[in-house]
Image: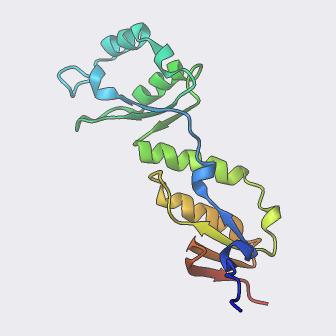
Amino acid sequence: MEEPIVNRVANSKLITVDLEELYPRDERIGIDISLWLKEGFILIEKEFRAALKSHDWSLYQNKFVFLYNSQEAIIPSWAYLLISTYLQTVAKKIVVGSKKDLDTVLMKEVIDSLDSAPYKGKNIIIKGCSKIDMPQNAYLMLLEKLQAQAQKILYGEACSSVPLYAKKN
């Protein structure tokens, strides 16, 4: 008589935490400040202010916005701040930097708000594969958040995981 095949992964007490499920899905949009620079590298305050005043800020309604400079021009800090005064009423979040910087900030907020109590004394696997280009820092932040609660933390998939942490008894 043949023994039934037992799916040990499905029957394990591992709790999988998938950062992809926590990832905010709202649209991200970048604003290249160099578009408002004279000849691509000179910021003239009066012209800059006029351009911002006439810009259609509704394009950024309920979006995550990252401000960047694609040129090698030196941009004064106040320029990013001035743009932000227009975005504050429409954008969900504003960050100076790249899309990756924005994603890192968003994931930090999500992880900081995550209730870690349900993971107390549990064996956790942080899912490694994602269809989203997840910032590496998000995994570090999640590990830091869960390590204080978990009994054991692994990384990867249940069938092929890497042990990261085990609480010493």
Q: Quadrant of residue 156?
A: bottom right
Residue 43 makes an appearance in the image: no
- The residue depicted at 47 percent of the width and 51 percent of the height is 132
Q: Is residue 168 above or below residue 135?
A: below
Answer with left or right where residue 121 lies relative to residue 28: right
Answer with left or right where residue 50 lies relative to residue 151: left
If the image is split into quadrants, where does the N terminus sit? bottom right
- The residue depicted at 73 percent of the width and 53 percent of the height is 114
Answer with left or right where residue 3 lies relative to residue 131: right
- The residue depicted at 55 percent of the width and 58 percent of the height is 138
If the image is split into quadrants, where does the C terminus sit? bottom right
Q: Is residue 56 above or below residue 28?
A: above
Q: Quadrant of residue 141?
A: bottom right
Answer with left or right where residue 90 lies relative to residue 11: left
Residue 152 makes an appearance in the image: yes
Q: Is residue 110 above or below residue 155?
A: above
Q: Nearer the viewer, residue 141 or 49?
A: 141
Q: Position of residue 86 (x, y in %)?
A: 51, 18
- The residue depicted at 46 percent of the width and 22 percent of the height is 82
Q: Nearer the viewer, residue 156 or 73?
A: 156
Q: Farthest residue in the front direction?
A: 1
- What scheme was used to colour the molecule? rainbow
Q: Position of residue 134 (x, y in %)?
A: 48, 54
Q: Farthest residue in the left direction?
A: 39
Q: How many marks?
A: 0
Q: Position of residue 110 (x, y in %)?
A: 65, 48
Q: Position of residue 26 (x, y in %)?
A: 55, 34
